[in-house]
Image (cartoon, rainbow, N blue to C red):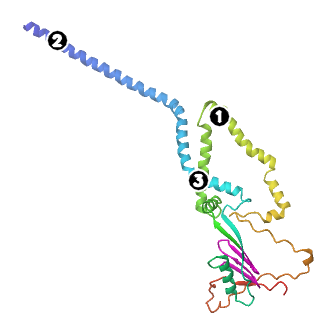
Amino acid sequence: MADLAEEAVPDKRKLELQEKATARTEAKEKTGKDKAAREKARASFEPTLKKRWRAWLRAVHRDVGYLAVGFTMIYALSGIAMNHIADWDPNFRSEELQLKIAPIPDDISDEEAVARVAAAAGLSGQPSDVLRAGDEVRLEYPNGSKVTAIGDSVTVQRRESRFFLRVANWLHATRGKAAWKFIADAYAVLLLYLAISGVFMIKGKLGLRWRGTLLIGIGLAAPLTYIIVAGGPDSQKTESKDDPKAASTAPSQDGIRPLPPDSEAPADDADAPRRPPARKQPPANAEDDGGEAPMRPPVRKQPPAGA
């Protein structure tokens, strides 16, 4: 029995040594595998980046598109409205009424004459400008409404603001709005990214190789063709010089077109006396009121035509 025990001791040590050697070998193999995996990942990073950049481009394109929705609605709708500014007023809704009243007597005061005309027109508030010449009374209000009373006829021109389009047009024309100018510049940068990133989002035949190039060419050909056919901006300047009437009635930035000049007097009335230009009268009690502006605008009087 003693001999068997002595033989078992060396076998046990031998097994321990073998286990340790096996563990060291496995550790070395694992370390080598980890190192090989790291080298493989490093070697495949660049190809993976090349494969994934379109996915990142699409993701950013999507988010920028969400940011640009509100801006695009403002600029697109106001742009359409301003393109047709010669056909309609995008900022105001106008209406004209014809009414009948008793003629304004010459012997009543200016205040009473203004009150009668305003009451007949159904307008409240102080007019911004008043003109009276005999039985003719003209009133203008800050919102653009106008009232003209001549004899027993009253013409009322009312204007109501188109809230959304007026605000959108105001934002579209950035002149005089320093803070909004930089916001508009940021929106322009977003549009540039959407345009450029959209070119490279898809590869293959649906991208630049065929379909994308064709559509880009059509999109560029439209403005270039119009420039060639229309003659460019110089031709527009020539047309405006040749047509002074059209130039005089050109719409302003806020979409309001001035009225055309009055028609010339007929040949039979060439010798008829003309009214002198209207002159504003100073307020009667300017000194008594300490030089403050009167509560209502001064009334500009004109003598009758036959005076």
Identify the residue under disc 1. Answer: 208
Residue 100: x, y in percent? 72, 77
Identify the residue under disc 3. Answer: 71
Q: Nearer the viewer, residue 131 or 215?
A: 131
Residue 145: x, y in percent? 68, 72
- Residue in view at x 56 percent, y 53 percent: 70
Q: Residues within 10 Å of mark 1 (few under 14, many from 20)?
A: some
- Residue in view at x 81 percent, y 47 percent: 229
- Residue in view at x 68 percent, y 66 percent: 94
Q: Residues within 10 Å of mark 3 (few under 14, many from 20)?
A: some
Pick out the residue farthest to the left: 1
Mark 3: secondary structure: helix
**Which circle's residue, 3 or 1, is located before the other in the chain?**
3
Residue 156 is marked as none
Residue 10 is marked as 2
Q: Nearer the viewer, residue 223 or 52?
A: 223
Three-letter amino acid code at disc 1?
Answer: Leu
Is there a contact, CB below 8 Å, between mark 1 and mark 2? no
Circle nearer the viewer, 2 or 3: 3
